[in-house]
């Protein structure tokens, strides 16, 4: 499956690894894991990882994010991970590279790179990197395995989401044959500061439910500023306070920002991706997002979710 990508990796002496903006555990895990793997298996190549950072997952980055000049892209291969569209890629200088590659498990929206492997049957991009390592016969260090395993458990919800398959467990087993402490991973992922626990409690009180059974939270920008945390924490970090309400199968979190209304949509049984795509977003069938122009557009999206849920009742 990865033959064309392997040939490009073997060809180029310099490889720069990108992923999506506001990285989650899967984006960082796949990027860090692949960086370690390529460094270990191709010691004569220059391997870099670039992009922004999310404080929530900073513990995963044991190898610093690289800062490169434009000229550094000359003669390079850019690898884009866990990203469904060009607008979401962190650091758009990937286009300066001599060749580009994408490895992704999101629903296809547009062509991004010269060579692409997109497979929605994987629960995570980390799973795809693990499968590629196995297919290519690469050595996988403890450090690489830990990064990839961390990304797998975040995107599969600790193997609870229905994207989890027998393939997921085969890949996880391969990684766990290396030596790393899973307790360290879970402690960093799920232990939280008292302030964050209190913030989730405040967000729980903000939940509204429509007659069609759609739960939602809307946070205006003035309120966002009062919380004193980044918008990623309020947007993606708070969407799942609505995830375990009996009788609720679709939920959405709207967060106003300087760049528009951040929208995170989730469902435990419906395909909400077409609605996210309609508003310029994307993602997975049951976990998607978009950035909307204003509250009016946010309420229009909510109406679409209400219609979807009403049709399914």
Image (cartoon, rainbow, N blue to C red):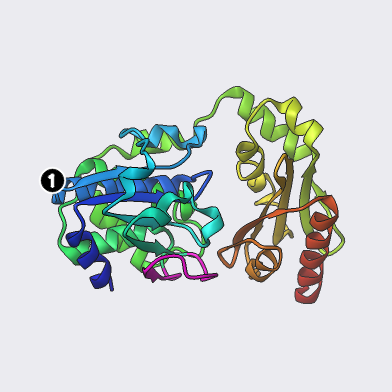
Query: As rendered, which of 194 and 108 lies closer to the eye?
Result: 108
- Quadrant where the C terminus sits is bottom right
For label 1, the residue is 43
Kindly identify the residue that appears in the image at 64 percent across and 47 percent down: 240
In this view, the residue farthest toward the left is: 44
Percent of width and height locating residue 176: 25, 49
Instruction: Indicate the secondary structure of the residue bearing disc 1.
Output: loop
Residue 60 position (above or below residue 41): above
Asked whether residue 177 appears in the rendered view, the answer is no
Position above or below: 101 against 274: above
Residue 18 place in picture, x, y as percent:
40, 50
Report the magenta residues as a range.
106-121
Q: Position of residue 310 (x, y in %)?
A: 81, 71
Mark count: 1
Residue 127 seen in this snapshot: yes
Extreme residue in the bottom direction: 311
Residue at figure coordinates x 81%, y 39% from the top left = 220
Task: Report x, y in % for residue 200.
Answer: 67, 35
Q: Residue at x 46, y 48 (%)?
A: 154
Dividing the picture into quadrants, the one containing residue 129 is: bottom left
Quadrant in which the N terminus appears: bottom left
Place residue 286 in its image quadrant: bottom right
């Amino acid at each position: 499956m990865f033959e064309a990508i392997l040939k490009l990796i073997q060809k180029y002496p310099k490889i720069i690894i990108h992923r999506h903006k506001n990285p989650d555990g899967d984006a960082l895990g796949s990027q860090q894991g692949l960086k370690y793997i390529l460094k270990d298996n191709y010691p004569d190549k220059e391997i870099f990882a670039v992009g922004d950072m999310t404080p929530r997952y900073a513990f995963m980055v044991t190898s610093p994010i690289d800062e490169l000049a434009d000229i550094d892209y000359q003669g390079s291969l850019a690898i884009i991970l866990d990203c469904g569209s060009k607008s979401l890629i962190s650091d758009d200088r990937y286009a300066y590279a001599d060749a580009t590659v994408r490895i992704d498990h999101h629903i296809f929206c547009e062509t991004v790179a010269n060579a692409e492997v997109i497979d929605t049957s994987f629960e995570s991009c980390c799973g795809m990197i693990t499968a590629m390592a196995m297919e290519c016969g690469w050595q996988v260090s403890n450090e690489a395995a830990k990064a990839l395993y961390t990304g797998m458990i975040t995107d599969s919800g600790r193997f609870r989401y229905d994207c989890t398959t027998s393939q997921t467990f085969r890949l996880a087993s391969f990684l766990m044959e290396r030596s790393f402490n899973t307790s360290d991973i879970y402690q960093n992922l799920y232990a939280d500061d008292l302030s964050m626990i209190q913030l989730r409690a405040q967000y729980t009180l903000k939940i509204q439910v429509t007659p069609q059974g759609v739960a939602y939270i809307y946070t205006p920008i003035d309120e966002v500023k009062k919380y004193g945390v980044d918008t990623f924490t309020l947007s993606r970090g708070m969407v799942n306070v609505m995830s375990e309400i009996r009788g609720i199968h679709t939920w959405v979190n709207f967060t106003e920002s300087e760049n528009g209304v951040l929208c995170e949509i989730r469902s435990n049984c419906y395909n909400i991706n077409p609605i996210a795509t309609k508003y310029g977003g994307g993602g997975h069938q049951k976990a998607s997002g978009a950035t909307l122009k204003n509250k009016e557009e946010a309420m229009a999206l909510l109406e679409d979710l209400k219609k979807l849920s009403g049709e399914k009742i």
